[in-house]
Image (cartoon, helix red, strand yellow):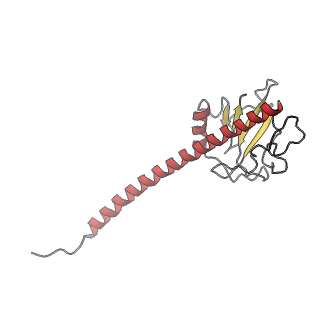
């Protein structure tokens, strides 16, 4: 009887195939877990920004000035009084706060729903903070926007108080306030 000193090619290929399947399943699970963590962090960030707006509003009886893509340390309304009566800041600024996909956040007091009422909007912007609005390097995947919408609103990016990816019609002209890779939350106070 001959002594066998190793594995056959078929056995090695089967083991490699099994390892490949297990690795792909593990990587897919890790990718989903990473997206869930990024969504959770972003939801926490925008809720924290809402809290900052609430404190600002309670102190000043007015909403903070717009702070969008080109907002920086010198014009962030949470860091500079800008002559607002009752301002007790500095509050924690938002100009350098980035979401997990590399874009920034913004705030804007804006008329929406075409009803003449103004609302405070928190942007999850695809542009990095303190850049031009054409930067677009921090696009949020639609799967993540849908998960955020499910947590904060109705799960539909075209309706409700959380909209995004260019699917809404909330602009004063009936156009979209968001663009592809961005989300906005109309914060109620």
- Report the front residue among 78 and 142: 78
Q: Please indicate whether residue 177 sits to the left or right of residue 31 in the image.
A: right
- Report the front residue among 3 and 56: 56
Q: Which residue lies furthest to the front in this view?
A: 88
**Residue 42 visible:** yes
Question: Residue 136: where, in percent of width, then height?
Answer: 71, 51
Q: Residue furthest top?
A: 115
Quarter-wise, where is residue 13 in the image?
A: bottom left
Q: Please indicate whether residue 68 sits to the left or right of residue 51 in the image.
A: right
Question: Residue 21: where, in percent of width, then height?
Answer: 38, 56
Question: Residue 56: where, in percent of width, then height?
Answer: 78, 36
Question: Residue 140: where, in percent of width, then height?
Answer: 64, 47
Residue at the spot 75% in from the left edge and 36% down from the top edge = 53
**Residue 176 visible:** no
Badge count: 0
Q: Which residue lies furthest to the left in this view?
A: 1
Quarter-wise, where is residue 67 in the image?
A: top right
Residue at the spot 67% in from the left edge and 51% down from the top edge = 138
Q: In which quarter of the image is the N terminus?
A: bottom left
Residue 98 versus residue 109 in the image, above or below: below
Q: In which quarter of the image is the C terminus?
A: top right
Residue at the spot 88% in from the left edge and 35% down from the top edge = 85
- Report the front residue among 60 and 50: 60
């Amino acid at each position: 009887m001959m002594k066998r000193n190793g594995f056959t090619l078929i056995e090695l290929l089967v083991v490699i195939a099994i390892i490949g399947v297990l690795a792909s399943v593990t990587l897919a699970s890790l990718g989903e877990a990473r997206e869930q963590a990024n969504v959770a962090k972003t939801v926490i960030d925008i809720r924290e920004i809402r809290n900052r707006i609430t404190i600002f509003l309670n102190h000043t009886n007015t909403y903070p000035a717009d702070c969008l893509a080109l907002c920086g340390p010198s014009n962030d309304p949470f860091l500079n009084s800008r002559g607002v009566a009752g301002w007790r800041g500095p509050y924690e600024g938002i100009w350098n706060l980035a979401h997990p996909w590399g874009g920034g956040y913004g705030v804007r007091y804006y008329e929406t729903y075409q009803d003449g009422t103004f609302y405070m909007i928190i942007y999850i912007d695809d542009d990095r903070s303190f850049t031009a609005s054409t930067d677009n390097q921090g696009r949020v995947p639609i799967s993540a926007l849908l998960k955020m919408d499910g947590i904060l609103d109705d799960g539909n990016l075209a309706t409700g108080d959380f909209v995004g990816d260019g699917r809404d019609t909330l602009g004063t002209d009936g156009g979209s306030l968001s663009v592809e890779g961005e989300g906005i939350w109309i914060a109620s106070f």
